[in-house]
Image (cartoon, grey):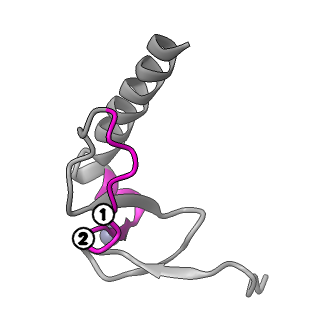
Amino acid sequence: MARGREPLVQCEKCKRMVPRSKAVEVVKGINFDLGDQKDVTMDLTRRVVYYCISCAKHLHIFEKLKKRNERRRQRKENRG
Ligand SMILES: [Zn+2]
């Protein structure tokens, strides 16, 4: 059962190596509440970190992602 194709990422909290498909990706470092200023370059401060499932649960990251997705969806609906 060697699945070598899956890239591994390291959990930011427990430092465990987990397959990227099972890790939770979180963008850290800046607030995205910039309104309509979509063209602001913020790649310098942007940092993507990964958490394994158990850490993500522990840190309530799923709830945060859900909220963020909802907000994004609402914004889309407002626009169109
Ligand atoms: Zn972890």
Q: Residue at x 38, y 81 (%)?
A: 16
- Front residue of this view, candidates 58 and 5: 5
**Circle on res. 45:** 2
Is residue 73 within the magenta segment? no
**Residue 29 falls in which quadrant of the image?**
bottom left
Residue under label 1: 42
Q: Is residue 46 left or right of residue 10?
A: left
- 70 over 47 or under it: above or below: above
Q: Is residue 1 left or right of residue 40?
A: right
* 37 vs 69: above or below: below
Decide which of 62, 75 is in the foreground and name it. 75
Q: Are marks 1 and 2 in contact (CB under 8 Å)?
A: yes
Where is residue 23 drawn, in percent x and y?
48, 64
Residue at 32%, 54% (x, y): give it.
40
| Label 2 crowd (10 A; few <14 / some 14-19 / many >=20) | few
Stretch of the chain drawn in magenta: 36-56
Amino acid type, label 2: Thr
On screen, residue 2 versus residue 54, left or right, reads right
Q: Pinpoint residue 65: horizontal percent, then vertical percent.
A: 37, 40
Q: Is residue 51 above or below residue 5?
A: above
Residue 28 is marked as none
Q: Residue at x 27, y 77 (%)?
A: 14
